[in-house]
Image (tube, rainbow, N blue to C red):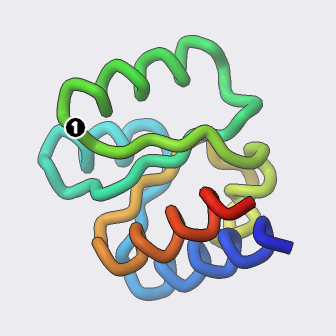
């Protein structure tokens, strides 16, 4: 049930223009200090998880490993996505609240 809420919030953030997806844009958002939260799919490659874990630790951006690639993709109206970054603090707080209460 909570997973549906997280997916809904990610979809709303996408429609509001407060979410970027894909490795390149997520990395760019983190490095430009625009990302407020990064979500990486559970089934993303180990290299991808390690890269974002190290990057988010360095830039002090919260990181969650959540869902499958197809869950992240369908939540935002795309096919598959290994990573997404929220660029809005309000959406970040709402998504973190839902993920942590799962």
Decide if residue 28 is on the left or right side of residue 76: left
Look at mark 1 in the image and give the residue it sits on.
60
Residue 16: x %, y % from top left: 41, 87
Quarter occupied by residue 79: bottom right
Q: Which residue is drawn at 22% across and 37% down?
A: 60
Residue 88: x %, y % from top left: 30, 73
Decide if residue 30 is on the left or right side of residue 94: left
Decide if residue 13 is on the left or right side of residue 4: left
Could you classify mark 1 by the number of other residues whose Cα lies within 10 Å: few (under 14), some (14-19), or many (20 or more)?
some
Q: In this view, does 8 lie above or below 46?
A: below
Decide if residue 44 is on the left or right side of residue 74: left
Residue 99: x %, y % from top left: 63, 59
Q: Which residue is drawn at 51% across and 62% down?
A: 96
Q: Which residue is drawn at 29% across and 27% down?
A: 57
Q: Is residue 36 above or below residue 46?
A: below
Assign the C terminus to one quadrant of the image: bottom right
């Amino acid at each position: 049930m909570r997973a549906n809420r997280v997916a809904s919030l990610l979809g709303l953030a996408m429609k509001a223009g407060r979410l970027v997806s894909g490795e390149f844009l997520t990395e760019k958002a983190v490095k430009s200090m625009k990302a407020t939260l990064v979500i990486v799919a559970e089934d993303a490659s180990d290299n991808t998880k390690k890269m974002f874990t190290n990057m988010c630790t360095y830039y002090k951006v919260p990181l969650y490993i959540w869902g499958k690639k197809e869950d992240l993709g369908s939540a935002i109206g795309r096919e598959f996505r290994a990573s997404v970054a929220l660029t809005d603090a309000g959406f970040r707080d709402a998504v973190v609240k839902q993920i942590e209460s799962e």
